[in-house]
Amino acid sequence: MASWNALSPSIVEYFEGEDFYRCGYCKNESGSRSNGMWAHSLTVQDYQDLIDRGWRRSGKYVYKPVMNQTCCPQYTIRCRPLQFQPSKSHKKVLKKMLKFLAKGEISKGNCGDEPMDSTVEDAVAGDFALINKLDIKCDLKTLSDDLKESLENEEMKKEKLSKKEESNESIHSQAIEEKLGSGEPSHSVKVHTVLKPGKGADLSKPPCRKAKEIRKERKRLKLMQQNPAGEHEGFQAQGQPPSLFPPKAKSNQPKSLEDLIFESLPENASHKLEVRVVRSSPPSSQFKATFQESYQVYKRYQMVIHKDPPDKPTVSQFTRFLCSSPLEAEYPPNGPECGYGSFHQQYWLDGKIIAVGVIDILPYCVSSVYLYYDPDYSFLSLGVYSALREIAFTRQLQEKTSQLRYYYMGFYIHSCPKMKYKGQYRPSDLLCPETYVWIPIEQCLPSLENSKYCRFNQDPEAVDEGRSKEPDRLQVFHKKAIMPYGVYKKSQKDPSEEASVLQYASLVGQACAERMLLFRS
């Protein structure tokens, strides 16, 4: 038996086999095919590793398309924010926002754009149908009791433990019980010590400064351009690495993304835009305080943009789809100030919410989950604007957390014209569906023009390095005990059980299979 200390608190319930559902992209009634599992809890590292193998979450349901069989193959796409340069169309959107904020001007012409994964709910509608059909009820209390008893049994076997170790094990067991029994992460108590959502902290932009101070700073930077010896020191004082925000060598050099987003507004600006990042799971005080207002924006968005009937976008659906998350809230000392986990990035215009970007902050990336907005502000191209703000936010987080350097945009679907826009955020990479390595999108597009499904890795000898090599080391939680699969399978006589577990292991990979607990009833 394995000790709990050697494991992460991730607990998943895998649904064996594949199912065909209606595709939310091409509308094929039975063309979408995916594997799925219910995540009772996930560490951010486990989820990071899962999305790097083509998985993606919708609420607590985590799914992986069967790429060579589904009608619209969905390739995981990531942007490299540190090298990102906004295109002409991106600059137009940012300038349009600045004009609106400064003078209240509303640009005429085509303002339509595709927000991040606006059709993701349609895409996994079949998966939710499966969940409803099985009437899945997360019996967290039973899991809690079983796990607690398992831990107690293991502690009884360790008579030689020191008092300090016994104390630590007891505390950890209590934390696990709270996590499973309440359905909320065990680290929720730490939220107020790291982030004070009630204060309206705007984590997606630099600290608020007066316009006069900004003008002085710009003048100083201009002088620094004429004094190369002082450039490096000047940027260090701002806490910005020279490699990330290099000083302008010429006055006609293109503006950076930050220059375009945070351009100073006149004191008599027509509107005020504020972006707040609030933790959604476990829900922070500000998330709770703004829940109803945020839900009403979501409801209008679904009804106007996606033509949902009024009774479809319910509070329950909103909570399950965009608020519930299996991700544990984690606050490592070398991580971002807001911690890791699930958040809502709220866009406040003149004191009211006009858009919300649902994001996950993970060890190596910011992962975009969904965006919804007030249809009255469609003219601001909020889908593009929010993506650019999230790229800038990733760059900001990277300043403190060096390994957090990617922006995941969900799935790129070349066969669906409405989803190809994600390829416009360059430089970006697509995940090879066979070897799980990242390939620059420019190298992938010619192949995708010829075939919906492609192996991007051109090395015919290359294999999935993270594949399941030792399935017997997979961790199983069964009948109140944690055990390796090698022990578990000795008591199983159903041959289909082995096929199911081996399929799960092949999809999640060796590392996750050894860390996560696979719940078996």
Image (spheres, helix red, strand yellow):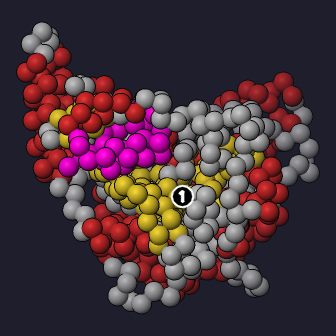
Assess whether residue 505 is covered by the magenta stretch. yes
Q: How many marks?
A: 1
Residue at (66, 68) in percent of width and height: 419
Residue at x 60%, y 69% (from the top left corner): 71
Q: Is residue 475 left or right of residue 90?
A: left
Residue 303 x, y percent position in the rendering: 47, 86
Percent position (x, y) of residue 316?
Answer: 30, 73
* Residue 244 seen in render: yes
Label 1 neighbour load within 10 Å: few <14, some 14-19, many 20+ = some
The residue located at (69%, 69%) in the rendering is 415
Is 56 one of the magenta-colored residues? no
* 91 sits left or right of 10 in the view: right
Amino acid type shown at disc 1: Val
Q: Nearer the viewer, residue 480 or 313?
A: 480
Q: Nearer the viewer, residue 421 or 198?
A: 421
| Quadrant placement of the N terminus | top left
Which region of the structure is painted magenta?
Answer: 492-521
The residue beneath circle 1 is 66
Give the overall secondary structure of the magenta segment: helix
Q: For the view shown, which residue lies furthest in the bottom direction?
A: 309
